[in-house]
Amino acid sequence: MDPETEDVLSTVGARLRTLRRERGITLAEVSVTTGISESTLSRLESGQRRATLELLLPLSRIYRVPLDDLVGAPRTGDPRIHLKPIERFGMTFIPLSRDPGGVHAFKMIIPARSEPLEPELKTHEGGEWLYVLSGRLRLVLGDRDMTLPPGEAAQFDTSLPHWLGSADGRAVELMILFGVHGLQTHVH
């Protein structure tokens, strides 16, 4: 095996251990969910067992990360472009577009919370279109308070006071298109 591949495989165990600990789950819980024995999982994490695709696939699903992240694979595509997530207002915005003068596309993640947030309505120039991917979005527009389940979309002028949050305390994922000078979507 070439040294580069050996280096990549030698770091898999530490990544697996870190992911499991970050999620606060035990080897026993991972074993029950994946069907991989605790001893195999322990040996993987300690580097005593080599990772295989058959072991990594169920682990990538339980940890909800791409296989590339588990093995530390180099990024593909244009090496000059690495759009980094933006943390704002307690939410994560992942840029999906780079055109500074056009429409901005984001995947937005509203984290789960044990205590509901009180809406703080904001205004700014522009227009927004959103589509709920998962979770239940609470959308407050002026004096309207709505809950949007997965598959629902909304479009509004951002000069109208608005707020986005979780309707039930669970995480929400959505796609957002934002245009500085307003946004009009055309559905055909």
Image: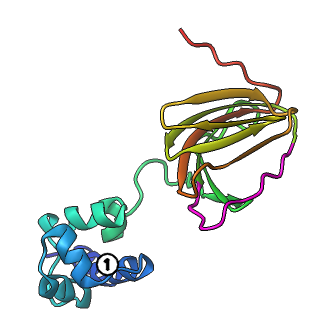
Which residue sits at x=37%, y=65%? 69
State yes or no: residue 111 in magenta. yes
Magenta region: 110-122
Amino acid under disc 1: Leu
Using the rendered view, name the quadrant where residue 141 is placed.
top right
Question: 53 above or below 25?
Answer: above
Residue 87 can be seen in this image: yes
Point out residue 108 in the picture as x, y percentages from the top left corner.
60, 48
91, 112: nearer the viewer: 112
Residue at 16% x, 84% y is 38
Residue sitting at x 18%, y 76%: 31
Q: Can residue 2 be seen in this view?
A: no
Q: Mark 1 points at which residue?
A: 16
Residue 116 relative to residue 44: left or right: right
User: Residue 187's x, y, as percent?
Assistant: 57, 13
**Left or right, 139 with reference to 81:** right
Count every numbered label the image shows and give the total.
Answer: 1
Please state if 110 lies on the left or on the right of 35 as rendered. Answer: right
Judged by its main secondary structure, the magenta piece is: loop
Q: Quadrant of the N terminus?
A: bottom left
